Amino acid sequence: MHIGIPLFLLRPRRMATVAAHAEALGFESVWLPEHIVFPPRIRSRYPYAETGAPVQPSTPLLDPLVLLAHVAARTERIRLGTNVYLAALRHPIASARMIVTLDVLSGGRLTLGVGAGWLEEEFTALGVDFASRGARLRECVRAWHVLWQEPTPSFQGRFFAFGPVVFEPKPKQRPGPPILFGGETEAALRRAAQLGDGWYGVRHTPESARMQIERLRALLHQEGRSLEHFEITVSAGGVTKEECAAFAKVGVTRLVVLPWQQDSEAEAALDRLAKLLGLGTDSTPE
């Protein structure tokens, strides 16, 4: 099982340094979330925490694809992930260009986590209908596939239409970067099963992950697919080697772990976690 690290809680100028340290220790990936704008007061309910919104509205926001390009320039092997990119807030041609740029510059290291979004005020500020966000996300992903695979792409959808156009270069990864769909609802899992290369779950235990994986197994079967080539990524808090093994046993292929709470602790916390899990040795967490 792969072990990833979120770059959350780090100052932006520290992210590349910490990512390079994680790479040297044998961690597989680093991850960044996204929001474009916050309202002065967040009224929407964050679906992954009982206490409400995960951050303060005054939290500084930087674009995750630009930040990951900065990280890519300081690293060589570690994969670069979004958890998650809010595709429905943009036109798919504009977002496809940003995604391809990062994939090419990084040498094909991007894993694109996408989600429908939960913050209604953010959609309102950008003039995008919140109620149709799931359908918009589906359409964006379909449009990306056309842009990344066809020589003269054309697309006609409910929300977006274009073409024929010329879109070059194509992604380094073919047919495109892996796309993981985030979300815990039936609709989110169905999107993952129908259109995704995998699923990204938030704040799980081995047992809760097992329940979602069984739901995904059934949905994939309906689509004539299986879990064999489908990535299961979940985030968790601090984990022991035994808990890591329990996640792997239920079918998790990547675990994203945040081992620090303060910026200054990052390198030391990574050192401890790598030693605990046996990273950088001949053995890997099982």
Image: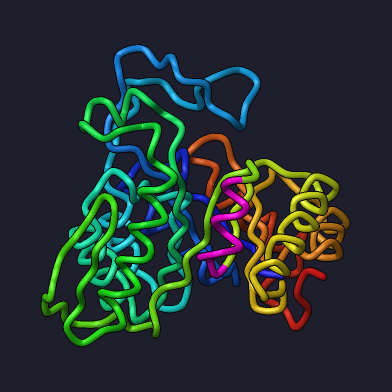
Q: Nearer the viewer, residue 129 or 65?
A: 129
Q: Quadrant of the C terminus?
A: bottom right
Q: Is residue 195 magenta?
A: yes
The magenta span reads 187-197
Magenta residues: mostly which secondary structure? helix
Q: Who's the residue at 76% across and 61% down the image?
A: 218
> In the picture, residue 69 is in which quadrant?
bottom left
Above or below, 142 against 135 in this view is below
User: Which colour assignment does the render follow?
Assistant: rainbow
> In the picture, residue 50 is in which quadrant?
top right
**Place of residue 213 in the rendered image (x, y in percent of width and height, measured from the top left):** 76, 57
**Place of residue 272 in the rendered image (x, y in percent of width and height, measured from the top left):** 69, 54
Is 91 on the left or on the right of 241, as rendered?
Answer: left
Query: How many marks can you see?
Result: 0
> In the picture, residue 139 is in which quadrant?
bottom left
Q: Who's the residue at 59% across and 65% down the image?
A: 198
**Place of residue 16 in the rendered image (x, y in percent of width and height, measured from the top left):** 36, 58
Q: Nearer the viewer, residue 146 or 65?
A: 146
Q: Quadrant of the N terminus?
A: bottom right
Above or below, 238 against 198 in this view is above
Q: Nearer the viewer, residue 214 or 64?
A: 214
Q: Who's the residue at 55% across and 19% down the image?
A: 52
Q: Is residue 65 magenta?
A: no
**Place of residue 157 in the rendered image (x, y in percent of width and height, measured from the top left):** 28, 58
